[in-house]
Amino acid sequence: MQYSIEKRPSYAMLEVTLANGEQIQTKPGAMMTRTAGIGNESNVGGDEGVTGMVKRAVSDERGLVDNTYYAEADDEQVTLVPEHPGDISAINVSESGPIRSQSGSLLAWEPLVERSTEFNNRSNLFSSGELTVLGLSGQGHAFVSSYGSMHEQDVTPENPLIVDEDHIVAWTAGLNLNRQKDGSIKSTVFGGEGFVTEFTGEGHVWLQTRNPMTFAVGGAEHDDDESAGGPSVSDFI
């Protein structure tokens, strides 16, 4: 498999070139284009059927479906895009070791990358309460997407990192996590205190420069304004 990430960082897309018989697996709705020699199939809960659904359960029903794209000849291509504007990063799971990722960020992965849902409360973070944590292990690349640009940062014993957890995309599994409330990220959109996560130990963290939950709530407020007779997009055309 060969890949390139184009249109970074605001509107990134992943171009994957497959040799005959090679595969790439994706979340539903990720495909933008494919060449005629690319076949595809969908699996509910992966190859384990209902058992796999329970094992890999994420925050919505679409997360229970895997799409597999496979090449029926050499040099066939499939182009993948995330649901939102932003960036894409490739993580070599073989080299990085096990990864933890918020479920909504995983875009695509090679077949030998194994996924599992992390149920322990310490790792099941995110202030939104709507995203779970996926464990990624095995061999090959996983591709994660961010809302906004992707920012990567190393964590060392001498330099721990404190992050507003709605900006977290992924982190190496060996890091220690400590979740705490933080009044400094209180927002007029959400109200109350937000949560931060302190990463300690030795590892790597992938972050997104924008908060998707703020965007979602802001959009909902505009929808309410429109339904109440407020301005809509058409008013400005």
Image (cartoon, rainbow, N blue to C red):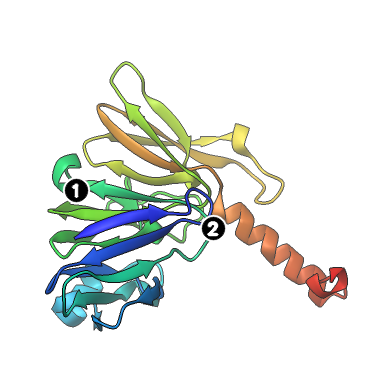
Please give left or right for residue 86 compared with residue 226 in the image: left
Q: Write the residue at 73% across / 70% down.
A: 223
Instruction: Give x and y (percent) for residue 6.
Output: 42, 54
The amino acid on which the numbered mark 1 sits, given as a three-letter code, is: Val
- Which of the pair 156/7 is nearer the observer? 7
Q: Is residue 208 visible?
A: yes
Which quarter of the picture shows residue 177? top left
Identify the disc placed on residue 179. Answer: none
Between residue 117 and residue 191, name the one nearer to us.
117
Q: In the image shown, does 61 or 85 lie closer to the viewer?
A: 85
Residue underneath mark 1: 93
Q: Residue at x 81, y 68 (%)?
A: 225
Which SS class for mark 1? helix
Measuring 27% from the left and 47% from the top, which residue is drawn there? Answer: 91
Which residue matches tag 2? 85
227 on left or right of 212: right
Task: Point out residue 62 in the picture as x, y percentages from the top left corner.
Answer: 38, 76
Q: Compared with residue 76, is residue 151 higher up or lower down, i.e. above or below?
A: above
Mark 1–mark 2 Cα distance, whole angstroms, equals 25 Å
Label 1 crowd bin: few (<14), some (14–19), many (20+), radius 10 Å: many
Looking at the picture, does residue 129 appear above or below residue 26?
A: above
| Label 1 vs 2, first from the N-terminus | 2
Task: Judge whether 199 appears above or below 120 on screen.
Answer: above
Inspect the image, locate mark 2, and give the three-letter code of the amino acid beneath it: Pro
Q: Tell me if residue 119 can be seen.
A: no
Element type at mark 2 = loop
Residue at the location (35% across, 37% down)? 205
- Of the 4 image quadrants, the one containing the C terminus is bottom right
